[in-house]
Structure formats: structure tokens, C-alpha cells
Amino acid sequence: MVITPIPWLHLNALIVIILSQPTYLLFTALADEYQAVSHLDTVMVFLYSIYIILYAILSSVLGDIIDEDFSATGNIKASLWHVAG
């Protein structure tokens, strides 16, 4: 029985990274073949997809840290300060 969806989110992020790599390679091959697709476009697509994946992972991890700190101290401002600075 799965109590939390967090392990599935990490697995999902890993699968998306694995699946996005061939897409990136395909786009770079298209950049060589077609003039309408530049190498900068392919890099931007790849970096944006990695940004989305990292946001999905980090938001759950940082949320757990905030929850633990808030449970220990009872002060949400201090919890956010510890995570965000």
C-alpha cells in the first residue's frame, strides 16, 4: 500500500527525463536538417523541460521540509525562512 505519492513522482520525473533525451537528440538533428529550427531552440526546449521536472521534484521535497519544520516550531514564517532564505 502506498501512503504517499512522492516515490511515484520521483519515478515519473526520472521517466520523463529518460524520454526527453531522445526528443532533444531528435531536435538537434532537425536543427542540422532544417533552417527553421535553430540549435538555440533545441537547447531552450530541453532546458525548459528540465526546469519543469526539477520544479516537480523540488516542490515536493521542499514542501516536506516546510511541513516538518512547521510541525516542530509552529511558526510558518520561520519555516519559510529556513527554506527560502
Image (cartoon, grey):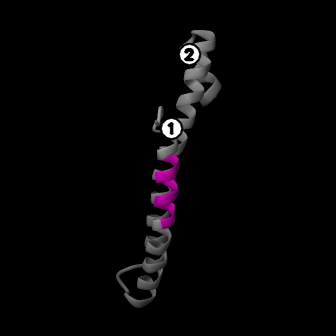
State the residue at coordinates (57%, 16%): 70
Is residue 11 part of the magenta span, yes or no? yes
Furthest residue in direction bottom, as rendered: 33
Furthest residue in direction top, as rendered: 74
Q: Which residue is mark 2?
A: 77
Q: Is residue 39 above or below residue 66?
A: below
Picture coordinates of residue 59, whole percent (x, y): 51, 38
State the residue at coordinates (52%, 48%): 10
Picture coordinates of residue 73, whole percent (x, y): 62, 10
In whole angstroms, how far apart are the C-alphas of marks 2 and 1?
17 Å
Q: Which residue is mark 1?
A: 59
Q: For this rendering, which residue is in front, 49 or 16?
A: 16
State the residue at coordinates (46%, 67%): 19
* Magenta highlight range: 9-18
SS under mark 1: helix
Amino acid type at circle 2 is: Lys
SS under mark 2: helix
Q: Is residue 33 visible?
A: yes
Picture coordinates of residue 31, whole percent (x, y): 43, 83
**Disc 1 crowd, CA 10 A, few/some/many (<14, 14-19, 20+):** few
- Of callouts 2 and 1, which one flags the residue occurring earlier in the amino acid sequence? 1
Is residue 25 part of the magenta span, yes or no? no
Which label is found at residue 3? none
Furthest residue in direction front, as rendered: 1
Q: Main secondary structure of the magenta part?
A: helix
In the rendered view, does 81 fall on the left or right side of 13? right
